[in-house]
Amino acid sequence: MGMHSFGNRANAFVTFAVTILAVMCSLASLSDNFNVHTPTADVKVFNINWFQKQPNGNDEVSLTLNISADLSSMFTWNTKQVFVFVAAEYETPQNALNQVSLWDGIIPSKEHAKFWIHTTNKYRFIDQGSNLRGKDFNLTLHWHIMPQTGKMFADKIVMTGYRLPEEYR
Ligand SMILES: *[C@@H]1O[C@H](CO)[C@@H](O)[C@H](O)[C@H]1NC(C)=O
Ligand SMILES: *[C@@H]1O[C@H](CO)[C@@H](O)[C@H](O)[C@H]1NC(C)=O
């Protein structure tokens, strides 16, 4: 066997390896395109710290939340980081959807994608009016997946059935 045929075999091997890599990449981006994410999240209101009508007439409430989530499935070879936020969503006579962001964070890697935190609302929960007494609301966990290449992807999990107290406290 001369140098020539060895060179051919090495070449064939490189071609084969490149083909495998291309197939793997297209499978990975295919799975990325289908967004086969199976995140789980749970947000509980641990405590209503206080609930007041401000002198300007707006309602404000301070909450302590238990937030737990497993966003590991969002981390593929193509995920740079995931931006996540928790919002309170409710209806008022003025607006069909009021969305107030209560907490947010950046998940830098799969190792940090499964987390649990116990926190007071990082951003103020204020209603521009006095609409919050006895108000039904949803808590939503939204995410924006920032890819290495391609389009950003956003979605949310809605948790229903929360209600604020009837009285200020
Ligand atoms: C929230 O977390 C605390 C621990 O800090 C735990 O004692 C409590 O049971 C949790 N509450 C809810 C409503 O899950
Ligand atoms: C909460 O979410 C459910 C399901 O998406 C929706 O039907 C309902 O209108 C929402 N409730 C509020 C108060 O926004």
Image (spheres, rainbow, N blue to C red):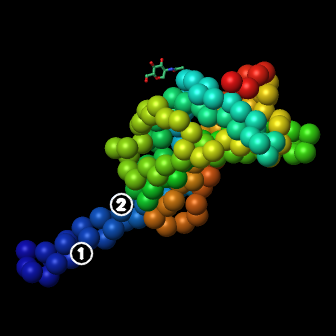
The residue depicted at 67 percent of the width and 41 percent of the height is 125
The quarter in which the C terminus is drawn is: top right
Sequence order check: which comes first, mark 1 or mark 2? 1
Q: Secondary structure at mark 2?
A: helix
Furthest toward the front, the residue is: 55
Q: Secondary structure at mark 1?
A: helix
Q: Looking at the image, is 51 positioned above or below residue 58?
A: above
* Tag 2: amino acid: Ile
Q: Is residue 168 left or right of residue 109?
A: right
Q: Position of residue 1 (x, y in %)?
A: 7, 74
Q: Position of residue 160 (x, y in %)?
A: 71, 27
Nearer mark to the viewer, of 1 and 2: 2
Furthest toward the right, the residue is: 93
Q: Residues within 10 Å of mark 2 (few under 14, many from 20)?
A: few
Q: Residues within 10 Å of mark 1 (few under 14, many from 20)?
A: few
- The residue under label 2 is 20
Q: Is residue 156 visible?
A: no
Q: Is residue 9 left or right of residue 154?
A: left
Q: Nearer the viewer, residue 139 or 36?
A: 139
- The residue under label 1 is 11
- Determine the CA span between mark 1 and mark 2: 14 Å
Q: Looking at the image, is 17 positioned above or below residue 57?
A: below
Q: Nearer the viewer, residue 53 or 65?
A: 53
Q: Position of residue 151 (x, y in %)?
A: 58, 64
The residue depicted at 49 percent of the width and 35 percent of the height is 119
Q: Position of residue 118 (x, y in %)?
A: 46, 31
The residue depicted at 57 percent of the width and 24 percent of the height is 47
The residue depicted at 46 percent of the width and 64 percent of the height is 148
Q: Quadrant of residue 33?
A: bottom right
